[in-house]
Image: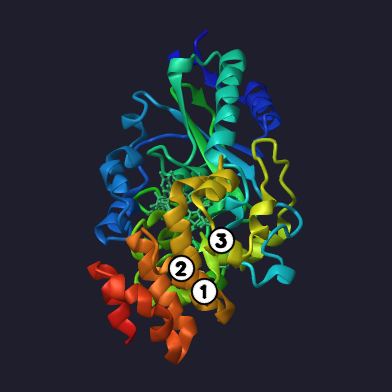
């Protein structure tokens, strides 16, 4: 029988399905009943401009708020979590504190590429065990128009913390999320804790299991939380170093510190991480070598070396110019004047974006002799954005 046509999967078959999906490498497998409710907060978030330049979030807002627009007739969602906690401190260790800091998720092969084969295999399991035909389900990881954290909270996979993350009692903050929408009806799991009076929109309140803790809100160096559970991307280091392809606002650069790509500060400080165990990495390709790159190596990256190191990683999408831009910001914050010659070279780079940030960084490190260091580059500069960086500090 085709489950998409009406059978309800529950009891032993449901648990068998969960086990088979776990065996594929998904550390958490939870089920939610899908209805239109939920996602009202997205409209408010977009209305406040918190999406910065991520216009694709606005374009797909209707779908994000109504899964039936993604898969007509959808009845259930399967929420999947992949633990990427390394279990020991790979990269970003204290001994390497002078090296730039990478978001932990970046120290892997691109998780979209490694998790998708697991989702395809999950589709085959759904067909075999649940009689769910391929046309009766649709899977996504990250890039689909699905509010992954909201549905994961609804399924009890975790709760949404004040840091906006989906936090698992078992894995802390270190889970990638993926989802499978299906027309089959699967008996839902319970959310972690039922509130006595759920908000009218059906959303789970942020910080449900945070208690009085505010560590993440207090630790954010760029003040990116306008309210608990709400991130203003414009101020978030993750957005600025990954999604923003242009100039990073000058007032945020100091707060970026040594964060080269992404930011885990509001995740790292969370006490729920103490329960995290090392992930199985069945659906991941670990790349701890990336964290070993020194700032000098990064500032001197060539197109060929960039392609060689970052092939198959999410970092590749930032492109060499984006990474050099970030490396300039990190160098400007690192306080090590030995980087000046590399930065001066970048102040004459082909890319306007790289030049602008290199000029800023030379001013940070060069002090009163910055103008001397930049004399040759400035004489040749014609771009208004870069010239603005020169005049901002002179
Ligand atoms: C856009 C985006 C970003 C943006 C905006 C972040 C943000 N807070 O929204 C930027 C670039 C800043 C970003 C940063 C990061 N991101 Co990001 N990001 C996304 C993306 C693509 C969409 C998120 C979104 O819709 N945001 C809009 C806000 C309003 O939505 P929301 O946070 O989900 O919250 C709403 C819903 O949950 C809803 N809601 C609440 N209860 C319920 C109940 C139901 C039933 C429903 C339907 C809805 C609902 O109300 C909430 C408030 O409006 C998701 C993938 C996806 N498809 O969901 C990944 C995702 C959220 N990111 C992820 C990660 C890992 C990160 C970083 C840690 C990366 C890094 N190290 O640099 C940081 C963390 C920053 C932070 N504290 O949030 C993971 C999070 C995993 C987890 N365990 O939570 C995701 C899920 C990707 C993935 N597939 O694993 N990200
Ligand atoms: S990821 Fe970093 S910058 Fe963004 S909200 Fe968390 S602590 Fe702030
Ligand atoms: S750090 Fe504290 S407030 Fe923030 S998500 Fe974790 S428990 Fe909640």
Ligand 3 - quadrant of the structure image? bottom right
**Residue that label 3 marks:** 298
Which label sits on residue 32? none
Farthest right residue in view:
88
Q: Disc 2 vs disc 1: Cβ atoms closer than 8 Å?
A: yes
Which label sits on residue 345? 2
Would you place residue 259 above or below residue 192 in this image? below
Q: Disc 3 vs disc 1: Cβ atoms closer than 8 Å?
A: no
Q: Disc 2 vs disc 3: Cβ atoms closer than 8 Å?
A: no
First in sequence: mark 3 vs mark 1: 3
**Residue that label 1 marks:** 341
Would you place residue 265 above or below residue 54 in this image? below
Q: Which residue is nearer to you in this view: 200 or 136?
A: 136
Image location (x, y in percent) of residue 8: 52, 20
Residue 52 in view here = yes
Q: Secondary structure at mark 3?
A: helix
Residue depicted at x 26% and y 43%: 59
Distance from mark 1 CB to nearest ligand 1 atom below 8 Å: no
First in sequence: mark 2 vs mark 3: 3
Residue depicted at x 46% and y 68%: 345
**Is the C terminus in the top left, top right, bottom left or bottom right quadrant?**
bottom left
Left or right of 321 on screen, residue 46: left
Left or right of 183 on screen, residue 79: right
Image location (x, y in percent) of residue 197: 43, 55
Give the number of marks.
Answer: 3
Q: Which residue is nearer to you in this view: 8 or 115?
A: 115
């Amino acid at each position: 029988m085709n489950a998409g046509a009406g059978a309800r999967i529950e009891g032993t078959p449901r648990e068998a399905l969960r086990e088979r999906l776990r065996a594929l490498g998904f550390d958490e497998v939870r089920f939610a009943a899908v209805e239109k409710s939920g996602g009202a907060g997205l409209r408010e978030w977009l209305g406040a401009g918190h999406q910065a330049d991520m216009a694709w979030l606005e374009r797909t807002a209707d779908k994000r708020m109504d899964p039936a627009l993604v898969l007509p007739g959808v009845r259930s969602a399967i929420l999947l979590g992949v633990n990427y906690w390394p279990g020991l401190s790979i990269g970003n260790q204290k001994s390497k504190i002078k090296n730039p800091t990478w978001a932990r998720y970046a120290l892997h092969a691109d998780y979209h590429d490694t998790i998708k084969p697991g989702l395809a295999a999950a589709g085959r399991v759904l067909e075999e065990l649940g009689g769910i035909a391929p046309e009766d389900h649709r899977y996504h990881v990250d890039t689909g128009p699905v509010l992954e954290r909201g549905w994961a909270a609804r399924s009890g996979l975790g709760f949404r913390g004040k840091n906006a993350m989906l936090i698992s009692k078992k894995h802390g903050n270190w889970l990638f999320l993926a989802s499978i929408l299906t027309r089959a009806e699967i008996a839902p799991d319970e959310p972690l804790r039922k509130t006595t009076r759920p908000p009218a929109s059906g959303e789970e309140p942020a910080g449900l299991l945070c208690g009085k803790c505010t560590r993440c809100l207090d630790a954010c160096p760029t003040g990116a939380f306008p309210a608990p559970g709400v991130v203003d991307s414009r101020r978030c280091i993750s957005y600025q170093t990954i999604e923003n392809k242009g100039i990073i606002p000058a007032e945020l650069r100091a707060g970026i510190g040594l964060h080269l790509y992404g930011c885990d500060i509001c995740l790292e400080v969370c006490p729920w991480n103490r329960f995290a165990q090392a992930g199985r990495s069945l659906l991941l390709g670990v790349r701890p070598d990336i964290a070993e790159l020194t700032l000098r190596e990064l500032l001197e990256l060539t197109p060929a070396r960039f392609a060689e190191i970052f092939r198959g990683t999410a970092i590749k999408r930032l492109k060499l110019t984006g990474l050099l831009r970030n490396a300039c910001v990190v160098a400007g914050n690192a306080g090590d004047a030995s980087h000046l010659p590399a930065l001066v070279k970048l102040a004459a780079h082909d890319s306007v974006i790289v030049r602008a940030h290199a000029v800023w960084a030379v001013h940070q490190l060069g002090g009163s002799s910055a103008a001397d260091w930049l004399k040759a580059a400035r004489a040749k500069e014609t771009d208004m954005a870069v010239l603005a960086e020169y005049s901002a500090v002179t």
